[in-house]
Amino acid sequence: MTDKIALTPKTHTTPPAKFSHGVRKGNILQVAGQVGFLPAEEGKPPTPAGPTLREQTLQTLANVEAILEEGGASWEDAMMIRVYLTDVDHFAEMNAIYNEYFEGRVEIPAARTTVYVGLPAGLLIEIDALAVLS
Amino acid sequence: MTDKIALTPKTHTTPPAKFSHGVRKGNILQVAGQVGFLPAEEGKPPTPAGPTLREQTLQTLANVEAILEEGGASWEDAMMIRVYLTDVDHFAEMNAIYNEYFEGRVEIPAARTTVYVGLPAGLLIEIDALAVLS
Amino acid sequence: MTDKIALTPKTHTTPPAKFSHGVRKGNILQVAGQVGFLPAEEGKPPTPAGPTLREQTLQTLANVEAILEEGGASWEDAMMIRVYLTDVDHFAEMNAIYNEYFEGRVEIPAARTTVYVGLPAGLLIEIDALAVLS
């Protein structure tokens, strides 16, 4: 019998609907789709880092990491990372940023799927993750 | 050693291919992508609720819930809900319906990712879910 | 306390970024998004089977299976299969190939979600999978 807990880093803006930024139950941790919003500031609407793919990607990864850490996990526990891009032409650049970010941060990288979808205006990337804790 | 079981609510239409509407193995329950098909009627092809996003979304959520329940789970066990919309302009309306639906139905909401993809003609929304039972 | 291991079949081309083709931790196995690349040949860039949807789909399923097997799992352990197609008009044909492939290969089929997204040029299908081992 394990309890489900919501993971809500202080840096995160309020979700736009009744969902949790992350949840953990037993050793399973799920991170909701994160985008490149800068740390929340009271009275300000959510604002993406930008305008480049690089800034948004790094902020998105930081937002995912904050939720993993809030649940007592790290990138090493991540099993699957789902990357949603809006533009196929961003694949090579995203990969370069991704590699640079994870260099030294993880010994056994998570699996990954990258697909190209629509996202709300101004957003170039969205990432979610599934982790299994030890 | 746990057995995998298929979850097939009586209300559901036959899947269009060799997949299960849901499966459970041990404490992990996976719901396949559900759309807003009305309860199956013998001799009738699958028919979506509609024509509005509201009708399709509520029917889709009911279809997901039926599979969770078939596996002995509830929304409270849901860890991740994936929402696929066909139109970015439906985001706000879907969120309003989503919030209204989950109000009172769940204490700790699941994580969620929403992306905009293509779906077969006539379908405005598809939802799948991962649950971890206690 | 379980260790995460990377699953890297010898037949597979090197991933284009710092991710694993598959990972297993305890009884959870995640397969990264696979496409229809033919078995790797030294000195040659990744080349998709083709040009038909049939050839790509069967190669993609073989690539997923190789990772499941590398982790000591089989299709019977698969809980969720995510299919990404680029063209809604491919749905019926993909289903026919999918059914034929799984006929006799699995007793209780995995759940599945199929959505229509963008993929890199030349790729018609991508598939990933989540498995829970007994």
Image (spheres, coloured by chain):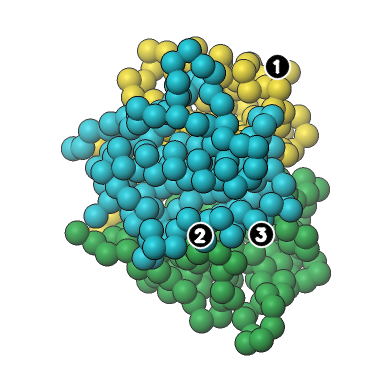
Chain colours: A green, B cyan, C yellow
Asked whether residue C78 is in view, the answer is: no
Where disc 1 sits, the SS reads loop
Residue C102 placement (x, y as % from top left): 44, 18
Q: Residue at x 59, y 63 (%)?
A: A34
Q: Which residue is mark 3?
A: B92
Q: Amino acid at mark 2?
A: Glu
Q: Assess whether mark 2 and mark 1 are in contact (beta carbons under 8 angstroms).
A: no
Q: Which mark is residue C52?
A: 1
Residue toward you, A22 or A68: A22
Nearest to viewer (mark 1 / mark 3): 3
Q: Give the quadrant of residue A40.
A: bottom right
Q: CA distance from mark 1 to mark 2?
A: 45 Å
Density class for disc 3 (Cα within 10 Å; few <14, some 14-19, many ≥20) is few
Q: Residue at x 62, y 80 (%)?
A: A39
Residue B113 placement (x, y as % from top left): 56, 54
Does residue B129 sit above or below A128 in this rendering? above
Of all chains, the one bearing label 2 is B
Q: Assess whether mark 3 and mark 1 are in contact (beta carbons under 8 angstroms).
A: no
Q: Which mark is residue B100?
A: 2
Quadrant housing the C terminus of chain C: top left
Q: Amino acid at mark 3?
A: Ala
Residue A77 placement (x, y as % from top left): 41, 60
Nearest to viewer (mark 3 / mark 2): 2
Of all chains, the one bearing label 1 is C
Where disc 2 sits, the SS reads helix
Quadrant housing the N terminus of chain C: bottom left
Q: CA distance from mark 3 to mark 2?
A: 12 Å
